[in-house]
Amino acid sequence: MVLLAVIVATHFWHGDSPRELGLTLDNLRASARAIAPLFLPLAAALVMVAAALLSRKLAIPWQYTLKMFGLYAGWCVFQQYLAQSYFHHRLMAMLPNRHLSSAMVALMFGAAHIPNPVLMIATTVGGFLFAEVFARHRNIWPIALTQAVAGYLIIAIVPLAITHNMRVGPGYYFFEH
């Protein structure tokens, strides 16, 4: 919590506006339009997987699944806030090349998911695409939703033995399925 307070304090220190940080509804439509080529196929795939799962008896109630998606989507908003609104915003102020700042954010985002190989690859590639959209349109909401759908799709189709239930850091090594 102390680290989060320091991060938020830096926004005040630098005079960052919520619009600059991508936290308002400004550019929402443009950002959604830019991320749609990635989001729509992911969403369609998730719907197909969900339909296949619903055709079988689920071990957990559907309402619980929706609640977990909502919680995970909130976690994705927080991750995109850190990646885009904090790190990418600062890097774009320092680096004249937005593609370079996007690549650096992608590498940091991927590294935050070490040692999970599935998540490292997905978050590095997705992180670059997300950073490019953010650099052009400064809005984290469609990006976070796309991340949430992609994450849920990964957990739905990749075996737990490979994803270790989306764990990163030391928890990755202690996951037992």
Image: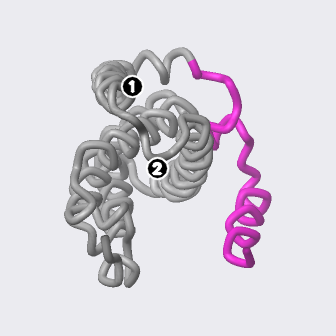
Identify the residue at horizontal 39%, vertical 28% (top origin): 54
Residue with the mark numbered 1: 35
Can residue 90 be seen? Answer: no
Foreground residue among 98 and 76: 76
Pick the front one: 134 or 96: 134
Percent coordinates x, y for residue 172 in the rendering = 33, 76
Point out the image quarter for the C terminus.
bottom left
Please state the horizontal and vertical placement of residue 97, each as a whole percent of the image.
33, 46
Task: Choose top left, top right, bottom left or bottom right for residue 29.
Answer: top right
Q: Answer few, some or many: residues within 10 Å of disc 2's Cα (few below 14, many 20 plus, some between 14 and 19).
A: some
Q: Amino acid at mark 1?
A: Ile
Q: Which residue is mark 2?
A: 92
Residue segment shown in magenta: 1-28
Q: Is residue 160 left or right of residue 25?
A: left
CA distance for labels 2 and 1: 20 Å
Residue at the front extreme, as displayed: 57
Q: Is residue 4 left or right of residue 34?
A: right
Magenta span contains residue 126: no
**Colour mapping:** one colour
Q: Position of residue 99 (x, y in %)?
A: 30, 44
Q: Is residue 1 left or right of residue 174?
A: right
Q: Amino acid at mark 2?
A: Met
Relative to 7, is 45 above or below?
above
Q: Secondary structure at mark 2?
A: helix
Q: Position of residue 96 (x, y in %)?
A: 38, 48
For mark 1, give the secondary structure.
helix
Judged by depth in the image, the label closer to the viewer, 2 or 1, is 1
Which residue lies at the image location 77% right of the left edge and 65% below the top edge? 9
Determine whether label 2 and label 1 are within 8 Å by CB. no
Answer with left or right where residue 136 lies relative to residue 19. left
Q: Name which residue lies at 50% across and 17% down.
A: 30
